[in-house]
């Protein structure tokens, strides 16, 4: 098998784990390596390749359920974009890119004058949340506030993750990716997707 075939096989296996178990791309690629019995230092496919396999997998196996699940998640994201409007929220991740299923979480980036203001807002809304630190836009550490929000059409709780950025990060956050797509969108951009 050529290196390309191996990368595609890893991507296809990872895609199944992303869709069926809700794994993130990174962990899914490593699980795929193990599942295929490949050595740990095997070159991994890029996220773009995995995403393309995820879209193919959804088209093949989830075409009847995924569009409604995506719509439910986008409508819930809209609620949060409105609720957190003062922090210039932008939707990213699978829900924005259009391949989310019911196992996916909602990823929002908030651009705040004061990083603590978003936490204060959640406390004022009686929201329980947890704080983690992850790698942000420019490789710097950023706080992520994670909470659960009930999604009525799916009849289950969905994870909502709020990445807290400085206001100055907003411009860089909207630069197109390698395929020329915007990596996240604001409320108006989401409204356009919902009415399309």
Image: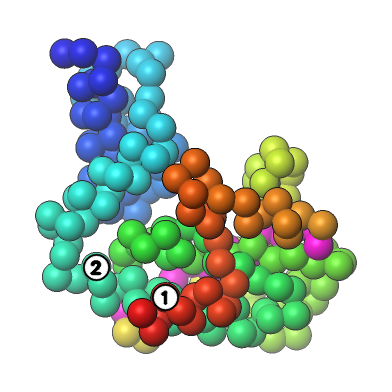
Q: Quadrant of the N terminus?
A: top left
- At a point 67% along the width and 46% down the height, the residue shown is 137
Q: Main secondary structure of the magenta part?
A: strand
Figure quadrant of residue 30: top left
Q: Quadrant of the C terminus?
A: bottom left
Q: Is residue 44 above or below residue 92?
A: above
Figure quadrant of residue 114: bottom right
Q: Residues within 10 Å of mark 1 (few under 14, many from 20)?
A: some
Q: Is residue 21 above or below residue 107?
A: above
The residue that mark 2 highlights is 66
- At a point 56% along the width and 50% down the height, the residue shown is 176
Q: Position of residue 7 (x, y in %)?
A: 28, 25
Residue 96 or 163: which is nearer the viewer? 96
Q: Is residue 39 above or below residue 111?
A: above
Q: Position of residue 165 (x, y in %)?
A: 75, 58
Q: Tell me the SS state at disc 1.
A: helix
Q: Position of residue 67 (x, y in %)?
A: 26, 72
The residue that mark 1 highlights is 193
């Amino acid at each position: 098998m050529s290196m390309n075939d191996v990368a595609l096989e890893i991507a296809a296996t990872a895609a199944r784990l992303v869709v069926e178990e809700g794994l993130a791309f990174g962990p899914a690629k490593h699980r795929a390596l193990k599942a295929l019995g490949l050595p740990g230092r095997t070159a991994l496919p890029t996220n773009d390749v995995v995403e393309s396999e995820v879209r193919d997998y959804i088209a093949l196996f989830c075409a009847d359920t995924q569009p409604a699940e995506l719509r439910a998640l986008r409508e819930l994201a809209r609620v949060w974009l409105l609720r957190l409007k003062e922090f210039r929220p932008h939707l990213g991740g699978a829900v924005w890119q259009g391949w989310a299923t019911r196992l996916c979480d909602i990823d929002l980036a908030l651009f705040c004058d004061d990083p603590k203001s978003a936490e204060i807002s959640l406390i004022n809304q009686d929201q329980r949340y947890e704080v983690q630190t992850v790698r942000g836009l420019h490789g710097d550490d950023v706080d992520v506030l994670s909470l659960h929000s009930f999604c009525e059409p799916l009849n289950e709780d969905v994870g909502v993750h709020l990445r807290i950025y400085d206001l100055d990060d907003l411009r860089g956050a909207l630069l197109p990716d390698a395929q020329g797509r915007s990596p996240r969108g604001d409320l108006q951009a989401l409204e356009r997707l919902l009415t399309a």
